Image (tube, helix red, strand yellow):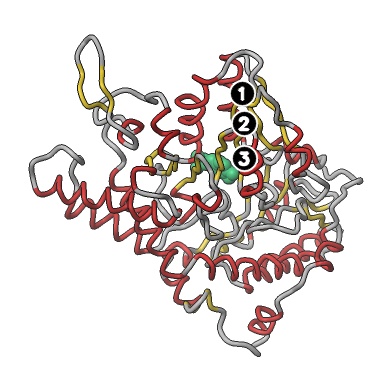
Amino acid sequence: MIPENSTSDFASYAKKTTLFPSLVEQRQGRGPIPRVGEAPLEKIRADFPILSEQVEGRQLVWLDNAATTHRPKQVIDRLVHYYTHENSNVHRGAHTLAERSTDAFEAAREKIARFLGAPGANNIVFVRGTTEGINLIAYAYVKPLLRPGDEIILTLLEHHANIVPWQLVAQETGAVLRVAPVDESGQIILSEYAKLFNSNTRFVSMTQVSNALGTVAPVQEMVAIAHGFGVRACVDGAQSVSHMPVNVSAMDADFFVFSGHKIFGPNGIGVLYGKEDVLDAAHPWQGGGSMISDVTFERTLYQKAPQKCEAGTPNVADAVGLGAAIDYVSAIGMENIARYEHELLEYGIRELGVIPGLTLVGTAAQKASVLSFVLNGHENEEVGRYLNRAGIAVRAGHHCAQPILRRFGYEGTVRPSLAFYNTPGEIELLARTLHEFVNSSL
Ligand code: PMP
C-alpha cells in the first residue's frame, strides 16, 4: 500500500516544469511529425521489429526501457552477418575468418572508445555487463587497496549492482561503506557527499542516472571532489549512456561501466572503461587464455589491459553487435536523443500529473527517462497488470534499488521508463489507461 504521507506530489511537480508545447501540438495535428533530430519517429520505429508486436491482443507499448531496450534491425542484421560471414575465435587464428572476426571485434572496441570520449581503444574492456564491470573493479582494483577501517563511498541512489560487490569486498577486508544522502527531490546533497571524505577513504562509486527515480547526479562535480581528496571514482553509466551524451574524459571518471542491452545492443555484453593507470594497477581479474604473454608452472606474465582483463574466448558477436548499436544511436545523435526524451518526459509528467492519487517518486530538476510513481490505495503490481492488459509494459517492484525507495517510504513503485522510440501517443495511452484504472476502482 502507498503511505499517506508521501512527500513528492506529482501534480505540483508537473506545474513547476517548463513544458515544450511542440509535442502537444504534434498530437493535435497542428505541428510536424515528431522527429528525433533529423529522423522521423515513424522511420525510427520501423527499425525496431518488436515494436510492432501484439501483446494481450493489443499493440505493444514498451515503457520498460530502464530494464532493457529493444534492438533495431541494424543490430540484429549485424549479428546474423557476423555468424554468417565472420565467425571465428579472435586474435589467434592464421586464417581469414580469424582476421575478419578480430577486425570486427577490435573495430567495435574503437567505436566504443570514440563514443565515450576515451583516450583510446586500450581503455575499453569487454565484460558481460555493468554488474560484471563493477565486480571486476571491486575485486581486481579496489580490494587489494583495502585495509580494516578503510572506507568506500557510495550514494543512496545506487542499484544493488553498485552496492553488493562493495559490501562483499568490505566484508572480506574489514572496510566500511559510507553512503551519500539525497534531498527530498532525490538529488545528491553535494555538501553532505563532500563531508564523507577523510584520510580513510579509498574509493567512491556512484550512478550517473538512478534507475528508480531518474535523477541525473552531478557526477562531474562528484568525481572532482573525490579527486580533490586523492580518491579514485567509478561512474555507473547503465542508465545514462542511452539517454545523453557521455564523455568520460570530460567527466574525468577513473572507471565507467555500462551494459549493451540498455543501449539497444545485445545481452551479455558490456563495457568497462578505465584510465590507463588504473587498468595497469588492477590485478588480474580472471586467469586463463588470451590474458597472458607467457606461462610456466612457476609464474605467468600478463598482457597489458585490456587483454589482461579479458581471460578466455570473448563474446565476439555481441561486442560487434554493440558496435552496431553505437553506430545506430550515433547516427541519430545523442544530443538529439537527449532533447527529444526530455520533451517526452516533461509531457509525461504533465499527462500523469492530473491523475487523482498519483504521486511521482523522484522530482529532481535533473531527471532522465524515468516516471516512477505510486497510486494511492493500489498495489504497484495491480497497476502493472492493468497496464499490461492494455499492451503497456512497465516495471512494478523495487527495481533492484531498495535503499533509495525506502528513503521515500516505499517498498516499490510503478516505473514507466522512456527511450527515443517512444511517442507522445504512447504517453497519452498510458495516462488514459491510468485514468480508466482509477475510475474503475472508485
Ligand atoms: N546499475 C544501474 C543503474 C542499473 O539500472 C542496472 C540495471 N538495471 C545495473 C547497474 C545492472 O546492469 P546489468 O544487470 O545489465 O548488469
Type of the residue with mark 3: Met
Residue 439 visible from this viewpoint: no
Give the residue at x 39% y 51%: 113
Residue that mark 1 sits on: 167
Instruction: Please provide percent x and percent y for residue 294.
Output: 20, 22
Local crowd size for mark 2, using a 10 Å CA cut-off: few (<14), some (14–19), many (≥20): many
Residue that mark 3 sits on: 206
Could you tell whether 1 is left or right of 53 in the image? right
Instruction: Please provide percent x and percent y for residue 95.
Output: 8, 45
Mark 3 CB lies closer than 8 A to ligand 1: no
Residue that mark 2 sits on: 163
Rendered-image quadrant of the N terminus: top right
Ligand 1 is located in which of the four quadrants? top right
Type of the residue with mark 1: Gln
Rendered-image quadrant of the C terminus: bottom right
> Rounded to the nearest whole Å, what is the CA distance between mark 2 and mark 3?
10 Å
Mark 1 CB lies closer than 8 A to ligand 1: no
